[in-house]
């Protein structure tokens, strides 16, 4: 399984975005279409946790078979979810989802983790518009690390029904990796142009996108 072609990789055309499904313990199913990802290419990628080919207990999921989850903690309190891809140490970070099902449950889960303005109801577009937000909305934590998306009963991928037209895919620089030298500027973040569910819009990159 390789998520990268679904968001235009090396000139591949966009097909149908995948839908991430999360089944909770009570049987509730939460669904979201993947609308934004970041690619991490492995040992040569200075922004990847696997740079230099280093393997640790933390990043072991990056070196497991394609379709394996790599979930890690940031800032000591937030989780990010990646899917291992082709090549040792390569993975795809899931950055944003378009919520499709279970939105009220997502809202409740997100409210559990929010700071400050917890009394304000979250808008739909705020539920999964970021890598940590989507983990909160789907109740994804470190216990999901190294799970197999092709076999797991609590989280998996489904094909999304094709729409009337193929949306344009923007290739832009990744977010928040300014200390990675030239790799900080490589266009390895992919998102659906015009999607209100995307976490960060890059207007300059969009100017060079063919619709």
Image (spheres, grey):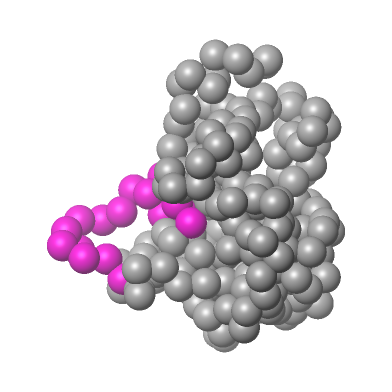
Q: Is residue 145 visible?
A: no
- Looking at the rendering, the stretch of residues picked out in magenta corresponds to 113-131
Q: Is residue 103 left or right of residue 52?
A: left
Q: At x 58% / y 63%, what residue is drawn?
A: 49
Q: Tell me: residue 50, above or below residue 124.
A: below
For residue 159, above or below residue 16: below
- Depicted 13 relative to depicted 134: above or below: above
Q: Is residue 126 visible?
A: yes
The foreground one among 166 and 206 is 206
Corner quadrant of residue 13: top right
Verify whether residue 52 appears in magenta: no
Say left or right for 139 vs 159.
Answer: left
Along the viewing direction, whichever of 7 and 60 lies nearer the viewer: 60
Residue at 60%, 35% in the rendered image: 186
Residue 126 lies, in percent from the top left, at 37, 49
x and y percent of residue 57 in the render? 62, 83
What secondary structure characterizes most of the magenta part? Answer: loop
Pick the quarter of the image with the N terminus. bottom right
Asked whether residue 120 is drawn in magenta, I would say yes
Q: Position of residue 137 (x, y in %)?
A: 45, 65
Query: Toward the viewer: 52 or 205?
Result: 52
Q: Position of residue 159 (x, y in %)?
A: 78, 52
* Residue occupying image coordinates x 63% and y 39%: 188
Q: Is residue 133 left or right of residue 183?
A: left
Q: Classify 127 as above or below 69.
A: above
Residue at 31% from the left image edge and 54% from the top image edge: 122
């Amino acid at each position: 399984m390789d998520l990268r072609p679904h968001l235009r990789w090396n000139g591949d055309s966009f097909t149908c975005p995948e839908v991430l499904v999360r089944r909770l313990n009570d049987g509730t199913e939460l669904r979201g279409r993947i609308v934004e990802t970041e690619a991490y290419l492995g040992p040569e990628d200075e922004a990847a946790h696997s740079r230099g080919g280093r393997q640790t207990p933390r990043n072991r999921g990056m070196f497991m078979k394609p379709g394996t989850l790599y979930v890690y903690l940031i800032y000591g309190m937030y989780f990010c979810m990646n899917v291992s891809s082709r090549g040792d140490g390569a993975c795809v970070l899931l950055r944003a989802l378009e919520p499709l099902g279970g939105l009220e449950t997502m809202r409740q889960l997100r409210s559990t983790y929010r700071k400050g303005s917890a009394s304000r109801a979250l808008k739909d577009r705020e539920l999964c518009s970021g890598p940590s937000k989507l983990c909160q909305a789907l109740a994804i934590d470190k216990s999901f690390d190294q799970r197999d998306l092709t076999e797991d009963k609590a989280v998996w991928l489904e094909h999304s029904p094709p729409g009337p037209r193929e949306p344009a895919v923007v290739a832009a620089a990744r977010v928040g990796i300014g200390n990675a030298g030239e790799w900080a500027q490589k266009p390895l973040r992919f998102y659906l142009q015009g999607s209100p569910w995307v976490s960060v819009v890059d207007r300059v990159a969009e100017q060079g996108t063919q619709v």
